[in-house]
Image (tube, rainbow, N blue to C red):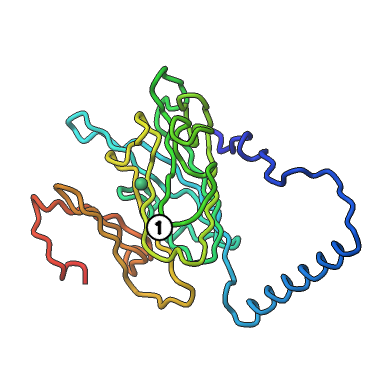
Amino acid sequence: MLYEFNQRYRDMDFSGNSSAIQCTPQQSLLKQLLITLFMGLVLSFLISGKGIAAEHVIQLTAEETRDDGFGNKLLAYKMINHKRDGVDITSRYSPNATIPGPTIELTEGDAVKISILNAIPDSDVPVPGISKQVSIHVHGVHYDILSDGTLKVINKLFDEGAGAGLEETYAVYEYKWNVAPGTAGTWAYHDHNFETHNGAEHRGLFGAIIVNPIGAPSYAKEYVLYLGDDAFWGMEIMVVLENNRSTALILSCLHKKILMSDFI
Ligand SMILES: [Cu+2]
């Protein structure tokens, strides 16, 4: 399947009315003042060393897992590529599709373009009344409605995912996140479109983003833990073992006594 962006989203013009408008001398002066003020703000950010935002370009797929021997298959996100300011940092992730999905670390002020490719078999074949799309619906960071990662029945605009939706079909769908100041924290992302308008979060399509405050200390090991009704799921981040790759943890509390010391 080609990794092509949906044209409808990319070609959309957000610049508004572009027809030429004559400025009066007062308006020109005001414009110059605003430009000077803006340049001053940019310079002060650069001098203080703060607010130097990174640009992330991230590509994920959603895949079906192997049969568990009883006819059950789950779904999982996989990191295909992550570039931070043009530097490839994909090697910090597992090369496999994992449950939970890849934990994505960001910093306040960053900008993110994240796209999803649907690699679930037959997901591009429309089925009346059933969405085969997968999406990335995120919490915590800011975005406009075209990056909500939901179906048109919810957002009233488009089926915002990859694969055959109820109305639109895309091979790849791209979202834009504004990791605005004030969004620091650990947040969930998950599918919202597969088969129901609440998606397939319960079948494995979920993960976390960590938004660090500017200047936050870094830690040798971090864990994101998810609590379900019969299992702990987790993601170990930046592990020194295993070539610094993040590793998914699936720890059933029915079969294993879990101690917090396991994580320290
Ligand atoms: Cu949610």
Pointer 1 residue: 209
Query: Is any atom of residue 97 visible in this view?
Result: no
What is the three-letter code of the residue carrying label 1? Ile
Q: Position of residue 228 (x, y in %)?
A: 19, 49
Q: Position of residue 23 (x, y in %)?
A: 88, 56
Crowding at dot 1, Cα within 10 Å, few <14 / some 14-19 / many 20+, comes out as many
Q: For this rendering, which residue is in front, 68 or 49?
A: 49
Q: Is residue 91 left or right of residue 54?
A: left
Q: Position of residue 123 (x, y in %)?
A: 43, 27
Against 170, residue 89 (above or below) is: below
Q: Is residue 184 left or right of residue 29?
A: left
Q: For this rendering, which residue is in front, 91 or 128?
A: 128
Which residue occupies the extreme bottom position in the image? Answer: 48
Task: For the C terminus, give its image quadrant.
Answer: bottom left
Which residue occupies the extreme top position in the image? Answer: 128
Q: Residue 47's image quarter?
A: bottom right
Q: Position of residue 200 (x, y in %)?
A: 33, 37
The residue under the point 72% across, 70% down is 38
Against 153, residue 28 (above or below) is: below
Against 113, residue 172 (above or below) is: above
The residue under the point 43% across, 62% down is 105
Q: Residue 34's image quarter?
A: bottom right
Q: Is residue 144 left or right of residue 93?
A: right
Query: Is any atom of residue 157 visible in this view?
Result: yes
Against 2, residue 76 (above or below) is: below
Q: Secondary structure at mark 1?
A: strand
The residue under the point 32% across, 70% down is 221
